Every structure is written in structure tokens, then in C-alpha cells.
Amino acid sequence: MRKITKSYKNLTDDQMRAWERLAEHTSGQSVFGQAAQLTGINLYVRLNVNRTMAGESILEDAPEQIIALPNVVYDKLWITPKTAVIKGIIHETGLKLVVKMSAGQSAGVSSGWDKTVIITPGMEDDWGDADMTYLYFKTIGVKPVVGEKIFVEMYWLDPVSGFTGQTTYDSKVCESEEDAEAEGYVKRNKITMADLKPESHVSECDVDFSTGAPVISFDTVCLGHSNVASSEAYLEDELPADCIGTSMALARGMGDGNCALAAQSYIIWLRNSSWDGTSITFAHRGGYYVKPTEVFGPGILY
Amino acid sequence: MFNSTGNNFGAGSIQFKDFQAENYVVLNAKFSYDPSNAAYQAADVLEIYVPDLSIDRSAVTGVILTFQDRYVYSSYTWNNDGGTAVKSWIKDKNTICIEKLTNFDEKVEHTIFIQAFYPTLNQSGSTTKGTRTRIDMTQETRYLYWSSDTFCVIFEHWVFLHMQFSSCSYSYRNQPWEANMGNFPTDVCADVPFLGGSNQYNPSVNGYSLAHIENGVFTCQERMSGFDSTGYEPFIFAFLVRDGEEANGDME
């Protein structure tokens, strides 16, 4: 923030005047989730903190106008010791979702939003889901405990302008997986890095079974191992029976040597084994074998 | 079948074969453009504008980008045609996006093959399963040999195809190839990119050769020069719309 504040001095007079003009129109309006009197530098810092948080560069020219963003509309927040997910989010094209969450509080605490920290500075909803599980554990350091209350704040961020929408506040007492399922929670059939054992030979993993069609959606980076043209993803938990089978998907090299960008085909075996556990094997077939390779897109399942 | 209404990379009108369901779309198209044209140069992502699709966005799928690259030495033409996979997705009901891979922009012409399945995610049902059908590749005089991963998965309106070349008898190496595709639907007609082979002048990618499938017959008139190099495993990967059952926008 200090760097952004300092950079204001480097603006031209015209640029500063533009920020002041926009601030006059912004003051008193709830464009940051609360009414506020803002100066040009206040607005410059606020918008640019938001932008840099979302991975954008500092904006020197003031946006031409105030941009009103929608509220976050969603179905339900689910918190269990294994899951922290917001489901049923209405997708807003071009906007990023900022989510702040607290560590577990006593169930009797009625207002704990001052204890929230940023879990994600700006993510796109994943087809209506915002799965915070991995990010929550990574940020807070401990898993939610059944009976503790988690406080959540969320709002949309426009990464281009830096404007944000109204903050939506929610809280949820962590419940057991069984209770959540009884209440209607349906776990999305999807495998990510959070589901894998560390000895897996993939650096990114997104295997999504929620297509309702005869394909699995892949986005996985295979690193290879030993001298075998395949990579194993070892899962902590068993795959559901309807996910067991064989798939075939397209791939492209990510290396920097010969055939760095080579198209390839991969056969993918998804299995639960009583002998060596549950795994997904990505085995090279067509094209020149390259390490690493990204296996992506729909893979037919049979 | 439908035609594009425009694009942002100077390709002219593009004709699509399609099968559109409530939760996915299978599209087939083949089109070319000159990468030196101003529209292409200005685009960050290639966009094709189309009439309303049945889905308003999709997850990423793969399409094939190819180019020609020939060197003529007196009586011999050294064929270094190449290609690779690029990402594609449906951005909204009227826009199909294709990743712009600039590595081959110095080539005279690019040809893109869309033979792709565009899925949607977070649907209420999980993945369903098809049935693998081995393709019985036959010839009167057998000179082509295929890997056991030459198979298809047949659905009412479309078919998934994977073919992987193993070897060819030496005397037929430079002849036009033809083979019957037993068990493969006869209502599929498509040019298909055959990717593989060592590409001496474009070493970052495999070679590219053009094959054709029609009435259950596979043909391939010529191959790029490094086609049968060891370890380069030429293959075909395609989701193909069936003509006989083409739905033209009907929901499955």
C-alpha cells in the first residue's frame, strides 16, 4: 500500500485532477461496500490496492466513471472439517470474487467479521462453486472443527477498474460431513491437488467429472517419473464407482527442448485398487512424449 | 450445420457441422487464414462469431492448428508440415474462442481443425460412460499396421475417434494409403489431421499429414517427410459429428 501511496506523487497534475473529480462523485456512494468521503489519493490507493491484489498493475489514469457492481448471489455456504465451499454462485463475467474468512469461533459469537482474513484476493467462480477448502487450510492453518462458527465476507471485484461491490456477510457453524449430506450437500465430483498424496507425479490437477456427459474434463500437468512415459496421481480417498474406467484425452508439451509444444494423446486409467490404493494414471500414447505435458480438455470415458 | 457470422482474424465465413445438447456441443469445422493479415495480428484471442449455441459457455477443449512448410530440392519436396493442439472454449452463446499461439506466425497460412467436444461443468449428473469399439482396419493387401489404441466410442449423433499408426510395409511408404475402418460408422465424412512424425525444420512440434474419412474408408494421400520416425507416434484424435443423425440444434 505504501508503494501505491508514494506512486501518487508521480502522477501528472491532470491525472491527479481526474482522480479528485472521480472521488467527488464517489464520496457518499457505496461503491466499496460502505459509504465514505474520499479524496483523490484515497480513491487512487483503494482502487489500486484492489487491482494489485487481483494481480493487475497500478492504474495511473482514473476510470472515466464509477462502476456499480452486483452483490454476490449464491445458494449456500457449506463448512465441514473437510470442505469449505460456497455453492450456487451466479456467475458474473469478468469479475473476481474476493472472500475473507475467520478461524473457528465459539458458536455463541454473534459477530466475528472483524476476525476475517483474505482467503482469496480474487478468484473466478468455478461453474457456480467457490471451493475454499485448500485456500482456507493454507491461510488459517487448521481445519474447521465441528461446532465452531466461521465468519465469511465476500464481494465482487472488477480487476480492470479496481471497483468492488457491496460486501455480503455470512456465517456458518461447522458440521460433520454426514450432517451436511443429510442437509442436502452434494460433493462435486472433482479431483484437485488437495485430494492427492504428495508423491504424485503431477504439479497441477483438475479432473472434473461433473459434465453430465460421457467425458471427463481434464487440466493436469504431468511431470513423468522414472523412465516411464506416464504420470501417477495418487488419491487420498477412493473414487466413486461411476468414475472408475478409462479415458483418452488430448495433451500438449510444456517443455523447452525438442517437441516442446508437441500434441499428444494420453490414455488415462482411473482405478481403486486393494493392492496399491486409488490412482489416476496418465499414460502417453500418440505424438512425441514430452515432460512436462499438460493434459487438457474433455476425455471420453468408457 | 450453420455458418459463422464473423470472426476477428480474417478467416472469411466458416461452416460448422454441429450436434448441440443442453449441456454440451460437438463442433466440426476446418478453415484457414493468413497470419500476416492485420485482423489476426491485432487479436489477442481468436474469436468466431456464431448464431445462438445451446450452451452459453464451456470448459476448455482442444482443437488442432496446422501449417504447411515445404522445401523444394531439384526433384524432391521436403515436407515439413506441422501442427499441434491449441485451446478453445465457448465464451458466450455467440462466441467461440481459440487460443492464439504465435509460434508459427511466419508461415504463409494456418489451418485449424475444430473436431471438438465443448463440455459444461457442475452439471447435476456425473460423467456417463460410452463403450469402446475396436476399429478393424482391413486392406486387400495389408500394408498398414495400427496400435491397439485405434478405437472409437459411438453415440447416436457423434463419435469419438482415436487412431494410432504403428508401421507401414516399406514398398507402400510413399504411396497413397487406403484402408477400411470396420466397426466405424459410415455416416462420418471429415478431413482429419494426422499428427506425428519428426519435424526437422519445426522441431517444437510433431509433423502434420492430412487424412480423410468417408463412408468407413480411411485415406491418406501423402505424409510429411519424418512421418515414420521412431518415437513420434502419429495419431488422430477427434470428436466427429455423424451426418446421418445430425441434429442441427435439436436437444438430445
Image (tube, grey):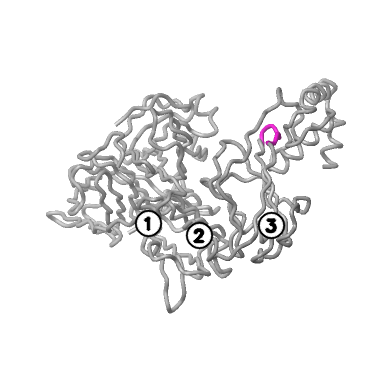
Give A139 or A87, whichever is nearer the viewer. Answer: A87
Question: Chief secondary structure of the magenta span?
Answer: loop
Secondary structure of residue under mark 2: strand
User: Of the residues shown, which amino acid type is indicated by label 2?
Assistant: Ile
The chain letter for the residue carrying disc 2 is A
User: Which disc number belongs to residue B159?
Assistant: none
User: Of the residues shown, which amino acid type is indicated by label 1?
Assistant: Met
Residue at 73% in and 62% down: A106
Image side of residue B72 versus residue A176, left or right: left
Magenta residues, start to end? A159-165
- Depicted B237 relative to depicted B107: above or below: below
Quarter of the picture containing the C terminus of chain B is: top left
Q: Is residue A161 magenta?
A: yes
Mark 1 or 2: the one toward you: 2
Can residue A279 be seen in this snapshot?
yes
The Cα–Cα distance between marks 3 and 2, rounded to whole angstroms, is 25 Å
Look at mark 1 in the image and give the residue it sits on.
A248
What percent of the width, then of the height, locates residue B145?
Answer: 24, 59
Can residue A292 be seen in this snapshot?
no
Secondary structure of residue under mark 3: strand
- Co-location on one chain, circles 1 and 2: yes
Q: Is residue B137 magenta?
A: no
Q: Are marks 1 and 2 in contact (CB under 8 Å)?
A: no
- Co-location on one chain, circles 3 and 2: yes
The chain letter for the residue carrying disc 3 is A
- Depicted B165 relative to depicted A163: above or below: below
User: Which disc number belongs to residue A150?
Assistant: 3
